[in-house]
Image: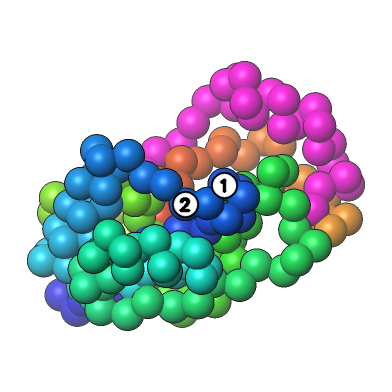
């Protein structure tokens, strides 16, 4: 199987540009990057300048094959759209690719077990129940037509997915 590039995203704006990881989070990020590189493909860190300096201070940049500059438009409020860093990178990277949260470890390569009769284009960690309180709040705060940049909220019959691990197998 061909290697599939992996990506970590570390956007510091939701933390007011003051990055901090606890020791257990650092160890988990190391395991996440190194296991992915061992079993699946090259690993890229996407981060802003405070994040790059922080990872350099910790001696963690060498875990990555490349480090890319993460730029999120200034009008995006990181207190509301704290995942905007990830979304910006999703728009920038070509498939096939895998996004892994710093606290997610893939001990093995993702296997696509669906076969030709059930093609798979996107793999996520798991779906989540829509009645989770955080989603209920989001549906109420951002009803259809009131979401980011005037775009309508996605089809409310679709279950949310956990993107701790998210793999795109094609650009469509």
Residue placed farthest to the front in the image? 57
Residue 45 is situated, as x and y percent measured from the top left of the image, at 37, 69
Which segment did they paint magenta? 123-148
Q: Which residue is mark 1?
A: 15
- The relative height of residue 58 versus residue 162 in the rendered view (above or below) is below
Asked whether the viewer can see residue 69, the reply is yes
Residue 37 is situated, as x and y percent measured from the top left of the image, at 17, 68
Q: Quadrant of residue 64?
A: bottom left
**Residue situated in front as seen by the camera: 96 or 37:** 37
Name the residue at 35% across, 55% down: 100
Q: Is residue 140 magenta?
A: yes
Q: Which mark is residue 166?
A: none
Asked whether the viewer can see residue 7, the reply is no
**Residue situated in front as seen by the camera: 12 or 170:** 12
Kindly indicate whether the residue at mark 1 contacts the one at mark 2 (C-beta within 8 angstroms). yes
Indicate left or right for 111 with 150 as reference: left
Q: Which residue is mark 2?
A: 19
Element under disc 2: loop
Indicate left or right for 163 with 6 as reference: right
Q: Is residue 130 magenta?
A: yes
- Label 2: few (<14), some or many (≥20) within 10 Å? some
Residue 48 is situated, as x and y percent measured from the top left of the image, at 52, 68
**Count of numbered marks:** 2
Name the residue at 65% across, 67% down: 72
Residue 20 is situated, as x and y percent measured from the top left of the image, at 42, 47
Element under disc 1: helix
Indicate left or right for 135 with 94 as reference: right
Query: Which quadrant of the rendered structure holds the C terminus?
Result: bottom right
């Amino acid at each position: 199987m061909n290697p599939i590039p992996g990506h970590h995203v570390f956007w510091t704006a939701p933390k007011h540009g003051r990055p901090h990881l606890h020791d257990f989070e650092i160890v988990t990020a190391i395991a996440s990057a190194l296991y992915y590189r061992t079993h699946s493909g090259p690993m890229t860190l996407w981060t802003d300048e405070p994040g790059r300096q922080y990872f350099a201070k910790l001696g963690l940049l060498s875990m990555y094959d490349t480090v890319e500059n993460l730029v999120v438009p200034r009008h995006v409020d990181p207190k509301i759209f704290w995942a905007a860093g990830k979304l910006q990178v999703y728009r920038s990277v070509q498939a096939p690719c895998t996004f892994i949260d710093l606290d997610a470890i893939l001990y093995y390569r993702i296997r696509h077990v669906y076969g030709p009769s059930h093609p798979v284009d996107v793999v996520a960690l798991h779906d989540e129940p829509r009645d989770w309180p955080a989603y209920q709040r989001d549906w109420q705060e951002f009803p259809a037509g009131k979401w980011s940049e005037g775009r309508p909220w996605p089809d409310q019959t679709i279950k949310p997915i956990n993107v701790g691990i998210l793999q795109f197998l094609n650009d469509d």
